[in-house]
Image: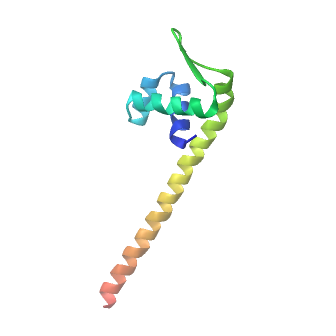
Amino acid sequence: MTLTQLNAFVLVARLGSVRAAAGALGVSESAVSQALTALRQDLGDQLITRSQAGMTLTPGGTRLLGTASQIVVLGAEAHAALATFLAGLRSRALALAAEERVDG
């Protein structure tokens, strides 16, 4: 199970289609379908079924959605925290380099 797979699952569940999830993620429908297939195989549940009425969560999918949503949010927060940290390091490195040029 990967963050990418969980993100695809959450978006399909919330947006109601693979197409909409693919658009939101900026990837192909095939990529979203592949992520869902891998997640289904890993967890041993269909998670989402397709019908003429649209996408429907299985009981397992319903159970997973809340936790998966939290994991996706935490992944985004972790990414943002690290990006902020790295930007701070770069700023300090640039400031030190500038000081060395002025002093040197």
Q: Quadrant of residue 46?
A: top right
The x and y percentages for residue 44 are: 63, 29
Q: Quadrant of residue 60?
A: top right
Q: How is the image coloured?
A: rainbow
User: Going 51% across and 21% down the picture, which residue do you hit?
Assistant: 16
Q: Can residue 65 be seen in this snapshot? A: no
Image coordinates of residue 37 in percent, x first then y, are 52, 29
Left/right placement of residue 12 relative to residue 103 reads right
Residue sitting at 51 percent across and 27 percent down?
A: 12
Q: Nearer the viewer, residue 90 or 95?
A: 90
Quadrant location, the C terminus: bottom left
Name which quarter of the figure residue 73 lies in.
top right
The spot of residue 93 in percent (x, y) is 40, 75
Q: Quadrant of the N terminus?
A: top right
Q: Is residue 8 above or below residue 56?
A: below
**Residue lying at 55% horizontally and 27% vertically, measured from the top left:** 14
In the image, taking residue 60 as reference, residue 8 lies left or right, namely left
Q: Residue at x 52, y 37 (%)?
A: 5
